[in-house]
Amino acid sequence: MRRWFRHAPHLLMAALGLIAAVGCVAAESFKGADVSGQGYGGAYRLSGHDGKTRVPADFAGKVVLISFGFTHCPDVCPTTLATLAAAARALGDDRKRLQVLFVTVDPERDTAQALSRYVTAFDADFVGLRGDAAATRQAARAFKVFYQRVPLANGAYTMDHSTGYYAIDKRGNTRVLFRYEQPLADMVHDLRLLIAE
């Protein structure tokens, strides 16, 4: 019994340290949905709006925000890209450790030139990505993104698609799913955590 009391102060200090450590981890959890290890992301091979072929390894060492949409989108996509641009600006000097990608789900209309005009209107460093139907499908499936063509009465069409966007860490692992209209402060918080890793 005396031996236990002799070690009690050390055990108490260790327990308090463990509680404090757990508290720190909880305080630093993601504000977006933590999707680490849940199968989001993977290989893709797409063409950048500058004509260069891009694969995930091209962005190693940077935190990547990736969004899917199309340039004829009337509201969700421009709102999303404006939010991503605001998040990039809010990072200050850490902005150089972030890359934003916009993958079109409408490659039939979204030419490289159209993508270039569209994404760079939000931020000059954003990269628009496109592929043929198969490459687009592969990239969307990798991130569990739904999209489909929807005919309109006048013979034109629009696109339905998932509205979330993803944060990928510097090692290429998809870590966070942000919902559409996630508060900007939440996004900046999570991006700072990933940049600091």
Image (spheres, helix red, strand yellow):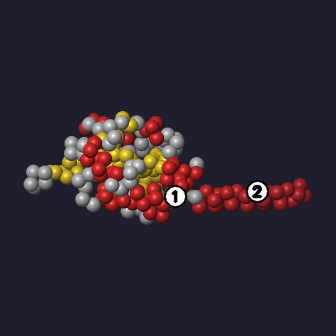
Farthest residue, direction right: 2
> Would you say 140 lies left or right of 38 here?
left
- SS of the residue under disc 1: helix
Which residue lies at the image location 16% right of the left edge and 51% below the top edge? 157
Density class for disc 1 (Cα within 10 Å; few <14, some 14-19, many ≥20) is few
Which residue type does callout 2 highlight?
Ala
> Would you say 18 lies left or right of 80 here?
right
Tell me where residue 87 appears, x and y as whole percent. 45, 59
- SS of the residue under disc 2: helix
Density class for disc 2 (Cα within 10 Å; few <14, some 14-19, many ≥20) is few
Tell me where residue 51 appears, x and y as whole percent. 32, 37
> Would you say 15 lies left or right of 141 here?
right
Q: Is residue 88 visible?
A: yes
Front residue (pair 37, 28): 28
> Would you say 17 lies left or right of 76 here?
right
Tell me where residue 72 appears, x and y as whole percent. 23, 53
Q: Which residue is mark 2?
A: 14
Q: CA distance from mark 2 to mark 1?
A: 38 Å
Q: Which residue is mark 1?
A: 92
Front residue (pair 176, 11): 176
Front residue (pair 45, 43): 45
Nearer mark to the viewer, of 2 and 1? 1
Which residue lies at the image location 61% right of the left edge and 57% below the top edge? 25
Which residue type does callout 1 highlight?
Gly
Tell me where residue 85 appears, x and y as whole percent. 40, 57
Front residue (pair 105, 119): 119
